[in-house]
Amino acid sequence: MSINWYPGHMAKTRRLLADDIKHVDVVCEILDARLPVSSRNPDLDALVGSRRRLIVLNRADQAEPAATERWLAHYRAKGYIAIATDSRQGGFKGEFVSAVGQSCADLLAKNAAKGIKKRIRVMIVGIPNVGKSSFINRLLDRKPAIVADKPGVTRRNQWFSIGGEFDFMDTPGMLWPKIDDDQVGYKLAFVGTIRDEVLDLEDLACKLIQTLLAAAPKALEQRYGVDLTELFAEGGYVERPPEAGGFDGEFLYRALCALARARGFIRKGNEEDAERMARTLLDEFRAGKLGRITLDRV
Protein backbone atom coordinates (compact mmCIF):
# COMPACT_ATOMS: atom_id res chain seq x y z
CA MET A 1 0.00 0.00 0.00
CA SER A 2 1.18 3.51 -0.74
CA ILE A 3 -0.75 6.45 0.74
CA ASN A 4 1.08 9.73 0.38
CA TRP A 5 -1.82 12.16 0.32
CA TYR A 6 -0.10 15.39 1.28
CA PRO A 7 -1.75 18.37 -0.47
CA GLY A 8 0.21 21.58 -0.90
CA HIS A 9 -1.79 23.41 1.76
CA MET A 10 -0.52 20.92 4.36
CA ALA A 11 3.09 21.86 3.61
CA LYS A 12 2.09 25.49 4.11
CA THR A 13 0.25 24.55 7.31
CA ARG A 14 3.40 22.92 8.67
CA ARG A 15 5.44 26.07 8.03
CA LEU A 16 2.84 28.29 9.69
CA LEU A 17 2.51 25.90 12.61
CA ALA A 18 6.26 25.87 13.17
CA ASP A 19 6.23 29.67 13.34
CA ASP A 20 3.06 30.12 15.42
CA ILE A 21 3.95 27.46 17.95
CA LYS A 22 6.76 29.67 19.21
CA HIS A 23 4.17 32.09 20.57
CA VAL A 24 1.84 29.74 22.46
CA ASP A 25 2.01 28.36 25.99
CA VAL A 26 0.15 25.07 25.63
CA VAL A 27 -0.42 22.67 22.73
CA CYS A 28 -3.66 20.68 22.79
CA GLU A 29 -3.55 17.65 20.48
CA ILE A 30 -6.91 16.28 19.32
CA LEU A 31 -6.83 12.54 18.55
CA ASP A 32 -9.47 10.14 17.28
CA ALA A 33 -10.39 7.91 20.24
CA ARG A 34 -10.70 4.98 17.83
CA LEU A 35 -7.07 5.53 16.78
CA PRO A 36 -5.21 6.97 19.78
CA VAL A 37 -1.82 6.18 18.21
CA SER A 38 -2.47 6.11 14.47
CA SER A 39 -4.09 9.57 14.58
CA ARG A 40 -1.00 11.16 16.17
CA ASN A 41 1.23 13.14 13.83
CA PRO A 42 4.79 11.88 14.47
CA ASP A 43 6.22 15.21 13.29
CA LEU A 44 4.47 17.10 16.08
CA ASP A 45 6.87 16.17 18.88
CA ALA A 46 9.75 17.92 17.14
CA LEU A 47 7.61 21.00 16.43
CA VAL A 48 6.21 21.25 19.97
CA GLY A 49 9.50 20.66 21.74
CA SER A 50 9.26 21.13 25.51
CA ARG A 51 5.99 23.07 25.51
CA ARG A 52 3.15 21.99 27.76
CA ARG A 53 0.94 19.29 26.23
CA LEU A 54 -2.68 18.26 26.56
CA ILE A 55 -4.22 15.25 24.78
CA VAL A 56 -7.92 14.98 23.93
CA LEU A 57 -9.36 11.65 22.75
CA ASN A 58 -12.25 12.97 20.68
CA ARG A 59 -15.14 10.93 19.26
CA ALA A 60 -15.09 8.79 22.39
CA ASP A 61 -18.75 8.01 21.70
CA GLN A 62 -17.60 5.86 18.76
CA ALA A 63 -14.78 4.10 20.62
CA GLU A 64 -14.90 1.16 23.00
CA PRO A 65 -15.26 2.69 26.50
CA ALA A 66 -12.88 0.28 28.25
CA ALA A 67 -10.25 0.81 25.57
CA THR A 68 -10.58 4.59 25.91
CA GLU A 69 -9.99 4.32 29.66
CA ARG A 70 -6.87 2.22 29.03
CA TRP A 71 -5.56 4.79 26.57
CA LEU A 72 -6.20 7.66 28.97
CA ALA A 73 -4.27 5.77 31.66
CA HIS A 74 -1.49 5.10 29.14
CA TYR A 75 -1.03 8.77 28.24
CA ARG A 76 -1.37 9.97 31.83
CA ALA A 77 1.34 7.50 32.84
CA LYS A 78 3.57 9.20 30.27
CA GLY A 79 3.00 12.55 31.97
CA TYR A 80 0.31 14.02 29.69
CA ILE A 81 -2.91 15.65 30.83
CA ALA A 82 -5.47 13.55 28.94
CA ILE A 83 -9.28 13.62 28.66
CA ALA A 84 -11.92 12.00 26.44
CA THR A 85 -14.66 13.99 24.69
CA ASP A 86 -17.76 13.48 22.56
CA SER A 87 -18.18 16.32 20.06
CA ARG A 88 -21.66 15.14 19.11
CA GLN A 89 -23.16 15.55 22.57
CA GLY A 90 -20.85 18.19 24.02
CA GLY A 91 -20.96 18.83 27.75
CA PHE A 92 -17.19 18.67 28.19
CA LYS A 93 -16.42 22.41 28.30
CA GLY A 94 -15.81 22.52 32.06
CA GLU A 95 -13.61 19.42 32.03
CA PHE A 96 -11.60 20.77 29.10
CA VAL A 97 -11.03 24.19 30.67
CA SER A 98 -9.97 22.46 33.88
CA ALA A 99 -7.55 20.24 31.94
CA VAL A 100 -6.03 23.27 30.19
CA GLY A 101 -5.58 24.96 33.57
CA GLN A 102 -3.97 21.82 34.96
CA SER A 103 -1.58 21.60 32.02
CA CYS A 104 -0.26 25.12 32.66
CA ALA A 105 -0.73 25.33 36.44
CA ASP A 106 2.91 26.31 36.88
CA LEU A 107 2.59 29.23 34.47
CA LEU A 108 -0.65 30.45 36.04
CA ALA A 109 0.94 30.34 39.51
CA LYS A 110 4.03 32.18 38.24
CA ASN A 111 1.93 34.94 36.65
CA ALA A 112 -0.21 35.27 39.79
CA ALA A 113 2.88 35.57 42.01
CA LYS A 114 4.16 38.41 39.84
CA GLY A 115 0.76 40.08 39.64
CA ILE A 116 0.71 39.57 35.87
CA LYS A 117 -2.68 39.34 34.16
CA LYS A 118 -1.62 37.66 30.97
CA ARG A 119 -3.91 35.41 28.97
CA ILE A 120 -2.67 31.90 28.32
CA ARG A 121 -2.41 30.99 24.64
CA VAL A 122 -3.44 27.48 23.66
CA MET A 123 -2.91 26.00 20.21
CA ILE A 124 -5.30 23.24 19.13
CA VAL A 125 -3.79 20.82 16.61
CA GLY A 126 -4.69 17.53 15.00
CA ILE A 127 -4.62 15.60 11.76
CA PRO A 128 -7.50 16.06 9.28
CA ASN A 129 -10.95 14.77 10.17
CA VAL A 130 -10.49 14.01 13.87
CA GLY A 131 -13.51 16.20 14.65
CA LYS A 132 -11.51 19.26 15.65
CA SER A 133 -13.96 21.82 14.23
CA SER A 134 -16.93 20.05 15.86
CA PHE A 135 -14.99 19.99 19.12
CA ILE A 136 -14.43 23.76 18.94
CA ASN A 137 -18.04 24.44 18.01
CA ARG A 138 -19.16 22.60 21.14
CA LEU A 139 -16.83 24.73 23.24
CA LEU A 140 -18.29 27.90 21.75
CA ASP A 141 -21.92 26.70 21.84
CA ARG A 142 -22.28 27.93 18.30
CA LYS A 143 -21.01 27.11 14.82
CA PRO A 144 -18.33 29.54 13.67
CA ALA A 145 -16.00 26.86 12.33
CA ILE A 146 -16.60 25.09 9.04
CA VAL A 147 -17.54 21.45 9.63
CA ALA A 148 -17.63 18.60 7.12
CA ASP A 149 -17.16 14.85 7.22
CA LYS A 150 -14.09 15.05 5.04
CA PRO A 151 -10.46 16.04 5.55
CA GLY A 152 -8.83 19.35 4.75
CA VAL A 153 -11.72 21.72 5.49
CA THR A 154 -10.14 24.21 7.93
CA ARG A 155 -7.53 26.13 5.94
CA ARG A 156 -6.40 28.96 8.22
CA ASN A 157 -5.57 29.67 11.85
CA GLN A 158 -8.44 31.16 13.86
CA TRP A 159 -8.33 32.59 17.39
CA PHE A 160 -11.27 32.31 19.77
CA SER A 161 -12.02 32.62 23.48
CA ILE A 162 -14.45 30.82 25.76
CA GLY A 163 -14.05 33.20 28.69
CA GLY A 164 -11.69 32.94 31.60
CA GLU A 165 -7.98 33.42 31.07
CA PHE A 166 -7.34 31.35 27.93
CA ASP A 167 -7.19 32.18 24.24
CA PHE A 168 -7.31 29.32 21.74
CA MET A 169 -5.90 29.01 18.23
CA ASP A 170 -7.57 26.57 15.85
CA THR A 171 -5.23 25.26 13.14
CA PRO A 172 -5.82 23.35 9.90
CA GLY A 173 -5.43 19.58 10.06
CA MET A 174 -1.93 18.43 9.15
CA LEU A 175 -0.71 15.00 8.08
CA TRP A 176 2.90 14.00 7.80
CA PRO A 177 4.44 13.77 4.28
CA LYS A 178 4.82 9.98 4.05
CA ILE A 179 2.91 7.26 5.86
CA ASP A 180 5.40 4.40 6.03
CA ASP A 181 3.31 1.99 8.10
CA ASP A 182 0.64 0.33 5.95
CA GLN A 183 -1.57 -0.49 8.92
CA VAL A 184 -1.54 3.15 10.05
CA GLY A 185 -2.35 4.26 6.50
CA TYR A 186 -5.32 1.93 6.24
CA LYS A 187 -6.69 2.92 9.65
CA LEU A 188 -6.50 6.61 8.74
CA ALA A 189 -8.32 5.84 5.50
CA PHE A 190 -11.01 3.88 7.39
CA VAL A 191 -11.96 6.95 9.43
CA GLY A 192 -11.85 9.33 6.45
CA THR A 193 -8.61 11.19 7.18
CA ILE A 194 -7.42 10.48 3.64
CA ARG A 195 -9.72 11.42 0.79
CA ASP A 196 -11.60 8.50 -0.75
CA GLU A 197 -10.84 9.87 -4.21
CA VAL A 198 -7.20 8.74 -3.98
CA LEU A 199 -8.08 5.21 -2.84
CA ASP A 200 -9.46 1.96 -4.23
CA LEU A 201 -12.63 1.74 -2.12
CA GLU A 202 -13.22 -1.97 -2.67
CA ASP A 203 -9.69 -2.76 -1.52
CA LEU A 204 -10.12 -0.40 1.43
CA ALA A 205 -13.43 -2.02 2.41
CA CYS A 206 -11.83 -5.48 2.25
CA LYS A 207 -9.07 -4.26 4.57
CA LEU A 208 -11.70 -2.86 6.92
CA ILE A 209 -13.47 -6.23 6.98
CA GLN A 210 -10.13 -7.87 7.78
CA THR A 211 -9.49 -5.42 10.60
CA LEU A 212 -12.99 -5.71 12.05
CA LEU A 213 -12.86 -9.50 12.11
CA ALA A 214 -9.91 -9.17 14.47
CA ALA A 215 -10.90 -6.07 16.47
CA ALA A 216 -14.69 -6.54 16.67
CA PRO A 217 -15.57 -9.99 15.30
CA LYS A 218 -19.34 -9.67 15.82
CA ALA A 219 -19.75 -6.17 14.37
CA LEU A 220 -20.42 -7.20 10.76
CA GLU A 221 -22.80 -9.98 11.73
CA GLN A 222 -24.78 -7.74 14.07
CA ARG A 223 -25.03 -4.87 11.58
CA TYR A 224 -25.72 -6.79 8.37
CA GLY A 225 -27.12 -10.09 9.62
CA VAL A 226 -24.46 -12.06 7.78
CA ASP A 227 -22.96 -15.18 9.33
CA LEU A 228 -19.55 -15.67 7.71
CA THR A 229 -19.14 -19.19 9.15
CA GLU A 230 -19.63 -20.86 5.76
CA LEU A 231 -17.10 -18.53 4.14
CA PHE A 232 -14.62 -19.35 6.89
CA ALA A 233 -15.03 -23.06 6.19
CA GLU A 234 -14.85 -22.66 2.41
CA GLY A 235 -11.71 -20.57 2.78
CA GLY A 236 -10.02 -23.22 4.88
CA TYR A 237 -10.29 -21.26 8.13
CA VAL A 238 -11.37 -23.58 10.93
CA GLU A 239 -11.89 -20.53 13.14
CA ARG A 240 -11.18 -16.84 12.94
CA PRO A 241 -7.43 -16.25 12.89
CA PRO A 242 -6.25 -14.41 16.03
CA GLU A 243 -4.78 -11.58 13.94
CA ALA A 244 -6.37 -9.68 11.07
CA GLY A 245 -3.54 -10.58 8.71
CA GLY A 246 -4.68 -14.22 8.61
CA PHE A 247 -7.17 -13.72 5.74
CA ASP A 248 -6.36 -13.67 2.04
CA GLY A 249 -7.72 -11.20 -0.49
CA GLU A 250 -10.09 -13.64 -2.18
CA PHE A 251 -11.81 -14.47 1.11
CA LEU A 252 -12.17 -10.79 1.98
CA TYR A 253 -13.68 -9.90 -1.40
CA ARG A 254 -16.15 -12.78 -1.09
CA ALA A 255 -17.06 -11.46 2.37
CA LEU A 256 -17.67 -8.00 0.86
CA CYS A 257 -19.92 -9.58 -1.78
CA ALA A 258 -21.80 -11.50 0.93
CA LEU A 259 -22.49 -8.19 2.70
CA ALA A 260 -23.66 -6.66 -0.59
CA ARG A 261 -26.10 -9.51 -1.18
CA ALA A 262 -27.41 -9.21 2.37
CA ARG A 263 -28.06 -5.51 1.76
CA GLY A 264 -29.75 -6.19 -1.56
CA PHE A 265 -27.05 -4.46 -3.59
CA ILE A 266 -27.46 -6.59 -6.72
CA ARG A 267 -26.71 -5.59 -10.30
CA LYS A 268 -28.21 -7.01 -13.48
CA GLY A 269 -27.22 -10.60 -13.94
CA ASN A 270 -27.54 -11.30 -10.21
CA GLU A 271 -24.06 -9.88 -9.55
CA GLU A 272 -23.24 -8.29 -6.20
CA ASP A 273 -22.53 -4.55 -6.32
CA ALA A 274 -19.29 -4.67 -4.35
CA GLU A 275 -18.47 -1.01 -5.05
CA ARG A 276 -21.74 0.22 -3.57
CA MET A 277 -21.28 -2.05 -0.56
CA ALA A 278 -17.74 -0.77 -0.07
CA ARG A 279 -19.00 2.82 0.15
CA THR A 280 -21.82 1.82 2.47
CA LEU A 281 -19.53 -0.14 4.78
CA LEU A 282 -17.04 2.74 5.04
CA ASP A 283 -19.78 5.35 5.56
CA GLU A 284 -21.49 3.30 8.26
CA PHE A 285 -18.25 2.54 10.07
CA ARG A 286 -17.34 6.24 10.08
CA ALA A 287 -20.78 7.13 11.40
CA GLY A 288 -20.44 4.64 14.26
CA LYS A 289 -23.27 2.42 13.01
CA LEU A 290 -21.19 -0.75 13.44
CA GLY A 291 -20.85 -0.10 17.16
CA ARG A 292 -18.21 1.38 19.43
CA ILE A 293 -14.91 0.08 18.07
CA THR A 294 -11.29 0.94 18.90
CA LEU A 295 -8.76 -0.15 16.28
CA ASP A 296 -5.55 0.77 18.16
CA ARG A 297 -4.75 -1.32 21.21
CA VAL A 298 -2.57 -0.34 24.14
Image: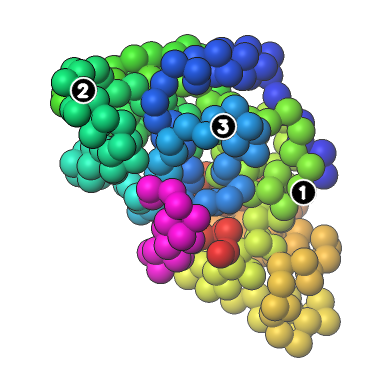
Residue labelled with disc 2: 114
Q: Earlier in the sequence, mark 2 or mark 1?
A: 2
Residue labelled with disc 3: 49
Secondary-structure class at tag 2: loop
Q: Residue at x 76, y 33 (%)?
A: 178
220 and 80: which is toward the camera: 80
The quarter of the rendered structure image containing the N terminus is top right
247 and 101: which is toward the camera: 101
Residue labelled with disc 1: 182
Relative to residue 284, is residue 110 drawn left or right? left
Q: Is residue 274 visible?
A: no
Is-magenta flag for residue 79? yes
Q: CA distance from mark 2 to mark 3?
A: 26 Å
Secondary-structure class at tag 1: helix
Q: Check the image and tell me how it is coloured.
A: rainbow
Identified by mark 1, the residue type is Asp
The quarter of the rendered structure image containing the C terminus is bottom right
Q: Residues within 10 Å of mark 1 (few under 14, many from 20)?
A: few
